[in-house]
Amino acid sequence: MSRYAIRAVAPSGEIHHFSREATTENEVALKVLREGLTPISIVQRDGGLVDFLNRPIALGTRQRVGDVALFCEQMGTMTASGLTVEQALRVISKQRIERDTTKTALRLLPRIQTGMSLSAALAAEPGLPPYLPGMIRAAETGGKLSEGLADAGRYMQRQASTRNGLLNALAYPAVVLITVVIALALVLIIVIPSFEPIFAGEEHQLPAITRAVLWLSNLAIHHLLNVSLFTAGTMLMGGAMLYQFPTLRHWIHQRISRLRPMQLAVQLDVSRVLGVMGMLFRSGVEVSEAVALAARAAASGRLRTALEGASRQLREGVSISAALGSVAAIPDDTRALIEVGEHTGELGVTTLRAAQLLESDTSYQIGRLVALANPIAIAFLGVAVGLVVGGVMLGILSINQLALRS
């Protein structure tokens, strides 16, 4: 499959830039039309550096998951109480204009008034989770829009809570590391230069650690800008090389993916995808379509590609357990639980349960790693400051010993 860059116009006149994967340009056009948009241009991406630089710049378009969850829960509650989608959007649009949910409702309302379904209107909305329109479309088809909105809201709220918990746990070691950098910069730029006159003329007789501290101080004072520019340029060139040479990118990805933190990140991504897949199964979405829609929730491009391949296998008549067996990122015990659901006719419920178990286990393991990060960060702070101070003190002692000998 190839990836296409699409420029499309919504019924309200809004211009949207996004990408889709398909086998042909005609297939892309049909997908865009089914989402309620009119394609203006469809360009196949070749994956090269020039293609990357030619992409339109879009900053800040992604909406926060917590805000989208709140919007879905509000819509689900109001439609369950008897309000139409248009009436519910009118109510939300009258809330404080600073809220993202209010802005979303104001953008969706004109589309609904032109006769678009809620799922089509959501598909034309930039920054939403790509799997959300498919979930709402399935709920509309089954006549369970309120339940579908509520389920989507609860699921995204749980995802937001998990993400916020991990970010909060990582905040302390991050603050410690930032403190280390600031403390070292102050010592090297302000404190160490005051000791340089003591060592003047005797640099060759100083301990190696003292000479290293003096060299770092000189580098920080006189060459900080050059070092920063060199580092930034090296990172940009490295990123360009990775983007230009897929083989090199694949080799580095294989090495990094063996690290335990990366494995846990992939498992967390898998749990998120399976959660979406389970809700789609439970809503009555056809299995191959549900897998294809759930693939859009994957943060990893490799996982997304593997799931799209599994979706094609399902359309060819392969069982769900066999199709998911081709996705190496899904753990064996998780796949076995989904297979049980396939045989018992409870595929949606079982897939959701498998996703929850995988998420709980992965979050527990990540918590253990983060708990280790706190003392490691403190130890790093102590070692870094100790090396700098020790280097200065050793230099002073060596100068004193030389003076006594003379």
Image (tube, rainbow, N blue to C red):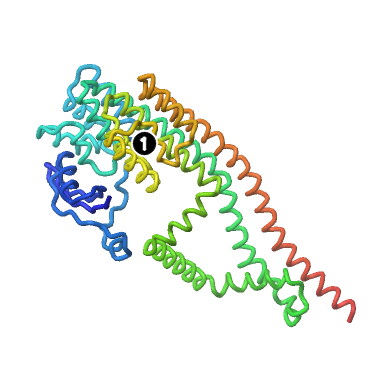
Residue 302 rendering spot, x and y as whole percentages = 39, 48
Query: Quick check: 328 left or right of 85?
Result: right
Residue at (81%, 75%) from the top-left corner? 399
- Callout 1 secondary element: helix
Residue 235, quarter of picture? bottom left
Residue 86 shows in this picture: yes
Query: Quick check: 211 left or right of 65?
Result: right
Residue at (86%, 74%) from the top-left corner? 401
**Number of disc labels:** 1
Q: Nearer the viewer, residue 218 or 121?
A: 121
* Residue beneath disc 1: 323
Mark 1 is surrounded, within 10 Å at the Cα level, by few (under 14), some (14 to 19) or many (20 or more) other residues, namely: many
Query: Quick check: 296 left or right of 231?
Result: left
Picture layout, residue 392 above or below residue 123: below
Query: Looking at this rendering, what residue extends furthest in the right direction?
Result: 405
Residue at (46%, 29%) from the top-left corner? 336
Residue at (69%, 63%) from the top-left corner? 388
Residue 132 shows in this picture: no
Q: Nearer the viewer, residue 255 or 15?
A: 255
